[in-house]
Image: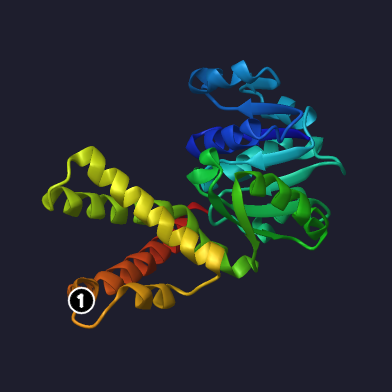
Amino acid sequence: MKIAIIGTGNLGKALARGILNTNGATSMVLTKRHTSSIQEFESYGNVTITTDNRLAVQQSDILIFAVQPSQLKTILTEVNDLLEERHVVISTAAGCSIAFIEEIVGPDRYLIRAMPNTALSVGSSMTCICSNPKGEKRVALAQAIFERMGHSMVIHEELMQAATVVCASGIAFWMRLIRATTQSAIQLGFEAREAQELAVYTCRGAADLLVKSNSHPEAEIDKVTTPKGCTIAGLNEMEHQGMSSALIQGMQRSFEKISNITREQL
């Protein structure tokens, strides 16, 4: 596959690493206004680094626009006349609807929206995908790309804003929870390096339990809570302090913010 990533910022770089490290592209073009921060990708051998978005479109079949929402209209307009039947347009720009993209490039294009997260770079992203009617013919292709770097789910477009909060912002939320667990472990007597290792692998184990056993969180909680035990005492204190409520309210606030940003930028 000939892939271009237009706008190789943090997400674009994670996406490039994920694809290249799994041999997911026969060639790749990476664009950025200032290319000094992405020169490292030339070491892969099949990668072209450029500031020229039009060149990237001409040399590629799959176009991933990993740009800021406020930049998407300008960049799509810049390359619109070069789009051909072969091109699959994938946008990761948060809040930019398919209808918004169609106003620029027309409805007769393979258009896909994708919302991954930065765990792409280590093969563990959760990516949500939706498309326009024509793009449905290329959804399997998009899934094949993103599932090289984790897991994907096809959803209705009206849920893409929520997916941004749960999956993309969610990485930061989970990092904060892991950090809090690490701090607690230090207070309980572990060295900082040991504490983080304990927190990280316990978190991963909890997720793996749910994935591999197709279980429910409460079912797994029941297995480690005993009458008058230390686990239920800790859980009850966390709930008394508002742990679940704080997480839910924080995600709701994040959703409100991204909705407001989208309205302002577009």
Measuring from the top left, give residue 205's x and y in whole percent.
42, 56
234 shown above or below 131: below
- Residue 164, given in percent of the width and then of the height, sits at 50, 58
The quadrant in which residue 128 appears is bottom right
Q: Residue furthest right?
A: 85
Look at mark 1 in the image and give the residue it sits on.
229
Q: Residue at x 54, y 19 (%)?
A: 40
| Residue nearer the viewer, 7 or 203 | 203
Q: Residue at x 53, y 53 (%)?
A: 94
With 101 as the anchor, is 17 left or right in this view?
A: left
| Position of residue 215 measured from the top left corner of the image (x, y, whole percent) | 51, 73
Foreground of the two, 130 or 68: 130
Indicate left or right for 125 with 58 as reference: left
Quadrant housing residue 8: top right
141 shown above or below 121: below
The answer to whether residue 96 is visible is: yes
| Residue 169, image x, y percentages | 42, 54
Look at the image and tell me in which quarter the N terminus lies.
Answer: top right
Residue 228 in the figure: left or right of residue 257: left
Q: Give the amino acid type for the residue marked by disc 1 in the picture.
A: Gly
- Residue at the image point whose x is 24% and y is 55% from the top: 181
**Which of the 4 quarters of the picture holds residue 50?**
top right
For the question of whether residue 165 can be seen, the reply is no
Q: Secondary structure at mark 1?
A: loop
